[in-house]
Image (spheres, helix red, strand yellow):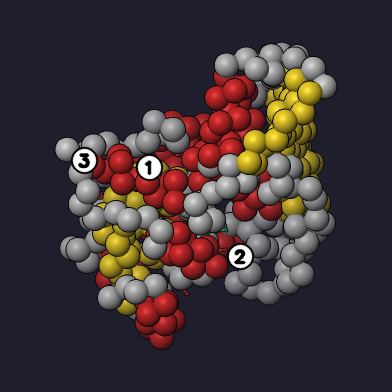
Amino acid sequence: MKDTRKIKWGIIGLGTIAHQFAKDLMLVEEAELVAVASRNLDKATAFAKNYDCKKAYDSYDAIINDAEVDILYIATPHNSHAALSIKALQNKKHVLCEKPIALNHDDALQMIQASKANNQFFMEAFWTRFNPSFREAFSKIKNGEIGEIKYINADFAFYADNLEGIGNRKTDMNLGGGSLLDIGVYPLFLCYVVLGIPSEILAKSNFHKTGADLQTSMILQYDNAQAILHSSFVSTSNIKATINGSKGRINLNTLWHEAQSYTLTVNDYEEEFPLPTKGKGFTYEIEECHQCIKENRIESEFWSHQNSLDLIKIVDKVRNQIGLVYPS
Ligand SMILES: NC(=O)c1ccc[n+]([C@@H]2O[C@H](COP(=O)([O-])OP(=O)(O)OC[C@H]3O[C@@H](n4cnc5c(N)ncnc54)[C@H](OP(=O)(O)O)[C@@H]3O)[C@@H](O)[C@H]2O)c1
């Protein structure tokens, strides 16, 4: 018999993505938002009212200690992902933590050790892995429909009109600022899922005066393939990804990380496959969390602990190449 019990969610950090996530949470029948936490009570109360949630806290510790919460969604700046996730896991909460998992591989490893030691589900919120267009395109790639993969080209860039000021998540080094950790992780994710761990990485950046990378270009070298990737806060881009094989290619169409369709081209015949998402598309990672929790699994087979560790190790290598060092 299907387990239809509700999974009770809490959200930590009520910024931009928390709003988008909460909207999608309301579309998932088995999800119930029971508590939210901000550093500011008025903000938490307004957020809770907006999304039909009964409890609003003005402290992150309070929500971590709330016995009713099954799983916490951590939607704070990158620098706090590790500490908050570890605290929540130690307090016997399951955790869905926003990307990037942490500032570096060492911190990520501690998060995963906390998940294992406390037997609680943990996943980095890499929602693209669960996107229907991505999943169908990836299964066609694996089935060899475009032949052997030889070249990936993917970017993620937008013009950010306000990059100044302490506390700006995009450029404040104390918050893990920079385009690489914020959006460069998406093209790196794509290459990692399709081609695995690269043998070599070349990367160059232009920097903000704070030291955060404003734009980063990367070449990933594999034994039999290459990738050219880009992330930026200082220009727009197509935000398109193309995976090119010996027999054809697949475009994950704009905005590719939340694709609503993909295009398959084989022998000059092009076909578009529309796969609109339910809500913005966070619904699929939410459903995956529910499935894992109900089956007493501490990780997803689609975006596993090892997947997150591999990806952040690749990010660390790019950081070393461009000379990006965070104060912490
Ligand atoms: N999956 C996606 O598509 C996606 C998209 C955007 C962002 N993200 C990720 O989600 C995380 C949050 O991004 P966002 O765009 O939602 O950021 P944001 O709008 O700046 O919100 C972050 C929230 O974190 C809390 N916070 C805690 N300590 C803070 C500090 N020292 N400075 C500023 N805020 C602090 C604040 O909530 P309170 O004031 O309520 O405490 C703030 O509203 C990032 O790690 C980012 O990579 C994911």
Q: Quadrant of the N terminus?
A: top left
> In the figure, is residue 179 to the left or right of 36?
right
Q: Please tell me which of labels 3 and 1 falls first in the chain.
A: 3
* Residue 315 visible: no
- Residue lying at 30% horizontally and 69% vertically, measured from the top left: 35
Tell me the amino acid under the disc marked 2.
Arg
Tell me the amino acid under the disc marked 1.
Glu
Label 2 within 8 A of ligand 1 by Cβ: yes
Q: Which residue bears the numbered disc 1? A: 288
> In the figure, is residue 172 to the left or right of 248?
left
* Residue 291 visible: yes
Q: Please tell me which of labels 2 and 1 falls first in the chain.
A: 2
Q: Nearer the viewer, mark 2 or mark 1?
A: 1
Q: Which residue bears the numbered disc 3? A: 2
Label 2 environment density (alpha carbons within 10 Å; few <14, some 14–19, many ≥20): many
Cα distance between the residues tagged 2 and 3 = 42 Å
> Dot 3: what SS?
loop
Q: Is residue 291 above or below residue 19?
A: above
Q: Looking at this view, is 30 or 200 the one in front?
A: 30
Q: Which residue bears the numbered disc 2? A: 169
> Dot 1: what SS?
helix
Q: Residue 163's spot in the image, x, y percent?
A: 73, 68
> Dot 2: what SS?
loop
Q: Residue 14's spot in the image, x, y percent?
A: 46, 70
Q: Which image quarter: residue 270?
A: top right
Cα distance between the residues tagged 2 and 1 = 28 Å
Tell me the amino acid under the disc marked 3.
Lys
